[in-house]
Amino acid sequence: MRRYGGPLPVARRTATTAKLRSIARVVLAKGTMTVHHLIMMDRLKTNLDEFKESEPGERFQDRYHRRRENEKGHVVLRVFNIIFGSVLALGSLALAPLPGPGILTVFLGLAIVAGELLYAARFLDWAEVTLRRFGRFVRGMWRSSIGGKALVTLGAAVLAAGLGYAVYYFLFT
């Protein structure tokens, strides 16, 4: 089994915490935030830094293993995260044609589930690598020539028309 990158180095965590404490003194003096908000923001920043430091194709599995290593939660919390992430992903998928964040919240729901289920983490790692490869292909086609731009535009138009037809079919027939 592959070993993930592990948590941030202590020196970097300490620097982040020291910077946060200096900001906390100013913010708390003004009375705009509580200590709990600052702790939450520090945890969020640390988790995001650890996520960014992982290699593409291994990020979600690393996050899963970090969460299992630091297991402090209860089974009820794990079940809640799985249900909440699934409802968020499926609900966002159903509401994707409407204005709003749509697809981004689908991936957010899947990321919540991937923190609890290894196979979901593996799927998101595979999807990340595949989408990056597809993005490089489309970018290469777009930059190649006028014909490449025409093909990318035509492909996007066909995809949009297919999505529009699917929405019409499911909502109005």
Image (cartoon, rainbow, N blue to C red):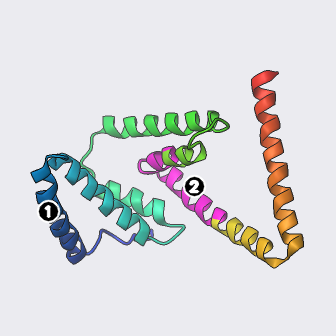
How many marks the image carries: the answer is 2
Disc number placed over residue 101 in the picture, else none: none
Q: Which mark, by number, is residue 21?
A: 1
The answer to whether 125 is drawn above or below residue 90 in the figure is below
Q: What SS does tag 1 mark?
A: helix
What percent of the width, then of the height, locates residue 136?
Answer: 69, 72
Earlier sequence position, callout 2 versus callout 1 = 1
**Which residue is outermost to the top?**
173
State the SS at label 2.
helix
Left or right: 82, with 35 as reference point: right
Residue at the location (63% across, 33% down)?
A: 94
- Residue at the spot x=32%, y=38% of the render? 77
Q: Which residues are magenta?
A: 109-131
Outermost residue to the front: 30
Distance of label 2 from label 1 (alpha carbons): 38 Å
Horizontal side of residue 38 vs 141, given as left or right: left
- Look at the picture and state if 144 lies above or below 122: below
Query: Marks 2 and 1: which is nearer the front?
Result: 1
Residue, disc 2 = 123
Please state which of residues 116 and 56 is positioned toward the viewer in this rendering.
56
Position of residue 158 relative to residue 75, above or below, is below
Residue 114 or residue 157, whichever sits in front:
157
Q: Is residue 70 visible?
A: no
Q: Specify the principal SS of the magenta part.
A: helix
Q: Amino acid at mark 1?
A: Arg
Dot 1, how many residues are within 10 Å of its Cα: few (below 14), some (14-19), or many (20+)? some
How far across and how far down the image is residue 32, in percent? 19, 46
Residue 86 in sight from this viewpoint: yes
Residue 157 in magenta stretch: no
In the picture shown, does residue 99 fall above or below 20? Answer: above
Q: Residues within 10 Å of mark 2 (few under 14, many from 20)?
A: some
Place of residue 156 in the rendered image (x, y in percent of width and height, measured from the top left):
79, 55
